[in-house]
Image: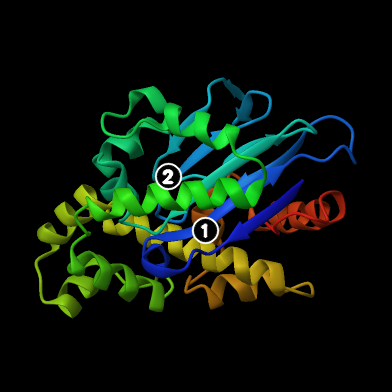
Amino acid sequence: MTLHQLRPRGPLRHVVQSLWWAKGSAAGPGEGVELLHPDGGLGVVFNFGTPLRRDARRHPGPAWVDGPSLRTARLGVTADLELLGVRFLPGWGGALLGEPPERLAEAGLLPAQALRHRALDALHERLQAAEGFAARVALLERDLLAWLRHSEAPSPLLGAALEWQRRRQGQGSVAELAEALAVGPRRLQRLFRRQLGLSPKQYARVVRVAQGRALIKRAEGPGALTEAAYAAGYCDQAHFVHDFTAVTGLTPGDYRRHVGRHEASFPGSRKD
């Protein structure tokens, strides 16, 4: 699989993590698997190939919203795969789509027709008529800018809370976060649920496990996984394995082996 990612410029840079295009490759037989890890944000996916397969389920249709998630998803990769997507920064996707993030978090992959304020099916038709990745990206950026002009930005308090957790790589408690921002824990809970779709504790786990994945990719030697656990802020390897498996569905050791196989099988794709 080949994956192209683009970080937009201008006002969208503060809203969108990336615009991306994924295309299957005929290099390998059968169906491969790409891991899609949670990051606290949500995205929109447009399909121009065969029906999408995710988590062993077939998802027909032109477009979906991929809501905030707590677990890694598994995308089936075949030669006929062709997807275009946008991944929003945490807190922004619900604002631009006009949907409560908590509703999107509960839905998993939400079909385009279920949205109340954005006609993603019609946008898919326009994207399909455009020729090439650059033309489709330009069209998508124009629509995103129009949505942005009529959207209410997330609370600055949410942005401060997310940045606080990112700087601490998910290792700060809700009580410490509330104290740092001089707000009550209940207010934080409501804010996260309303504008992110996750609780503060859930977001912290997602960030912490993401740090663990990055450490495992760089890990070398027989004691590397134990070192990764301590570096990610865990007091012992058992807790690290528990959280890592709960999010990714793989133990740290299995994930390490997956990364090695993935690099050999999909040399042109993202290292997941």
Q: Is residue 250 visible?
A: no
Q: Residue at x 30, y 56 (%)?
A: 91
Please state if 232 lies on the left or on the right of 228 as rendered: left
Q: Residue at x 31, y 75 (%)?
A: 164
- Hey, which quadrant is residue 34 in on the image? top right
Q: Which residue is mark 1?
A: 18
**136, above or below 55, in the image:** below
In the rendered image, residue 71, in percent from the top left (x then y), is placed at 49, 44
Please state if 174 lies on the left or on the right of 75 as rendered: left
Residue 241 is marked as none
- Hey, which quadrant is residue 84 in on the image? top right
Q: Which residue is mark 2?
A: 69
Q: Earlier in the sequence, mark 1 or mark 2?
A: 1
- Hey, which quadrant is residue 166 in on the image? bottom left
Please state if 54 lies on the left or on the right of 99 as rendered: right
Front residue of 210/127: it is 127
- Amino acid at dot 2: Ser
**53, above or below 200, in the image:** above
| Element carrying mark 2 | loop
Say which of marks 1 and 2 sits in front.
1
